[in-house]
Amino acid sequence: MNNKKVVVDRKKLIKYLKILGVVLVVVLFLWFLIIHPLLTFRGYENQIEEAAKRYYELNANQLPTGKRVKTLSVQELFDQSYLKEDFYVPFSKKPCSITESWVKVRQEDGEYKYYTYLKCGAISSIVDHDGPKITLNGDDEITIDKGDKYKELGVKSVVDNSDGKLDVNDVVIDSSDVNTNVTGTYEVTYTIKDSLNNQTKKVRKVKVVSRLENIVKQSTNNSGVYTGGNPHNYIYFSGMLFRIVDIDGDNVRIVADEDVSNVNYSAIDEWLEYYYDHITSKSKKYVVKNKYCNMKATDNNISNLDKCSSYTKEVNVSILSASDINQATDKNGDNYLFPDGISWVRNEKDQKTAYATRNVFYGYGTQYMAFSQNYNLGIRPVLTIKGDALVVSGDGTLSNPYSIDDFTYAKTNDKLNSRYSGEYILYSGMLWRIVDVSDDGTTKVIANTTIYNDGDRVETFYDTDNKAKVYNPEQKGNVGYFINNQVTQYVNTEYFVNKQIEVPIYKNNIKYGEESSTKKYKVKLSAPNMYEMFSAFDFGSETMKSYWLLNSSRAQYKKAVISDIGVVMYGDLYDYGEYGIRPVGYFDKSCVVVRGNGTLDNPYIITK
């Protein structure tokens, strides 16, 4: 019986010992992780406060008067040897922050009271050390237009965790940094202190921007329409150069600075869809669908059209009408929109003919003429982009066009096939322009000039017995054969790859999308396709003359050539005619950009 009692007592003893062990562990845990660190921290606080009191005993003239608060940093106490031993976060070698720690003193009821704040790792003093909370009227970031006056929105409320609600009029506002005449981001500061001199500084960012719509208004004396021979209205968009035409509602219309291709009038809308596909995805976010003038005209009224009475449906891209172009004429008769080439305008004369424009038609003294809608004439696409787009650079001149945030230049070692239609490349001593990027990673480019050799233009002609001169790179005596096999004498083709191309062949007239058949060939160089990007004559190039096109017909003498005056030649082209070469090729997918901006004046330099 006694043995059982001894066993029971032993079990109870073991149980009690286990409980005691747990309690001891908890106590030790609390001591080492909470109590000891807090006691150590309180010791630090006492040392700092005593050091501050010694400081003021020796520097009584530094004590604050009235309701003023004096702040003495712990750093200063160390610097003047009132404190000598460093403070460390308990159980670590990490020092406490002496730059963020301080002692504040102020007079209360005739005596000086000390407030010590020490930041030591995760532990900090339980004393008011936060400044008041400032809430502003309006947003913390606002945007205003260049030239507008900055209007201060002020402070909505100020609340302190100790002092409660403070007077908003006590907030010091500094907006001296804002310069609304220069674009950029500026800061307005709002500063206030609580009764313990804890300061809050809040910042409102003010972005001074140039919105495209406002730039157009300022540049046109609020008319919103550019006029004259050469207004500063150049804009870089989607890697291509445009001219700003006018303001349309809240948005801005821009037109290509050049004819991009030559297209028959009846296929304009279909071709414009192809063109729009070559606008970058980022740039498309700025494009606004719009209705464009397409009213019919006559020889008697087209030069005087101003108001429009008929419009297209809402589309992403179109071409200008005569009324759009006429409004750009100034009182001296100058007009930047009349091209050197022959470009279509969106005005039909009847079901078979439509109008085109140029500076002056030879022998006619007019700037508009009607042509068969089957003719392939120049196309200058027009787009409407958001008027609130921010202009990030440029002054509208040709050398420094406006630019919005829709486009970035390539960086060193960027793949060439990551770049965009319209950008320029300098290679083999010639300028090339990106047409598009193929699915296999090769980059299709077109030379920005025709081929020269020692200052002489390289020309060729069809030297075959076939009545129909159809473009064929495999047929000796054929223009296509000469371009693919002999132009390599004048152009370094190291970076070009052999590529399968598709040659369109037409039954009679050459018209967009109406080829009767196609033939595939593998080539390194070819002639341009009339309907592809940038195949039109570049009037800004001093070294471009007439050149062969890829398009050809089975009908005898029906071939496509760009003439010396920059337009597609019509009628019969006889076999003895010699014309220049403007090659098209494909850069290897491994090509990368070394330097440059891809512009006409600063083209990309590439390597492989």
Image: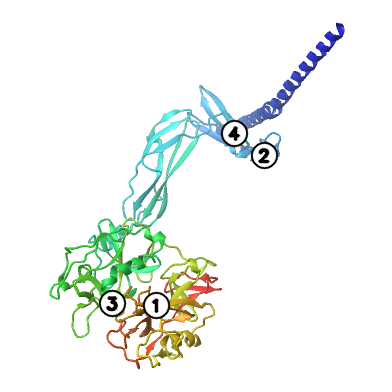
Please state which amino acid type lies under the numbered disc 1: Thr
Say whether residue 405 is visible: no
Mark 2 lies on residue: 95
The secondary structure type at the circle numbered 1 is strand
Q: Which numbered disc flags the more N-terminal residue, 3 or 1?
A: 3
Mark 4 lies on residue: 59
* Residue 443 in picture, x, y percent from top left: 48, 72
The secondary structure type at the circle numbered 4 is loop
- The CA span between labels 3 and 4 is 92 Å
CB under 8 Å between discs 4 and 2: no
**Residue lying farthest to the right in this orientation:** 3
Q: Which numbered disc flags the more N-terminal residue, 2 or 1?
A: 2
- The CA span between labels 2 and 3 is 79 Å
Image quadrant where one finds the C terminus? bottom right
Q: Is residue 199 left or right of residue 235?
A: right
- The CA span between labels 3 and 1 is 23 Å
* Residue 113 in picture, x, y percent from top left: 55, 26
Q: Which numbered disc flags the more N-terminal residue, 2 or 3?
A: 2
- The CA span between labels 2 and 1 is 80 Å
Question: Callout 3: 10 Å neighbours few (<14), some, many (20+)?
Answer: many
**Residue lying farthest to the left in this orientation:** 300
Question: Callout 1: 10 Å neighbours few (<14), some, many (20+)?
Answer: few
Residue closer to the observer: 243 or 503: 503
Please state which amino acid type lies under the numbered disc 4: Asn
CB under 8 Å between discs 3 and 1: no
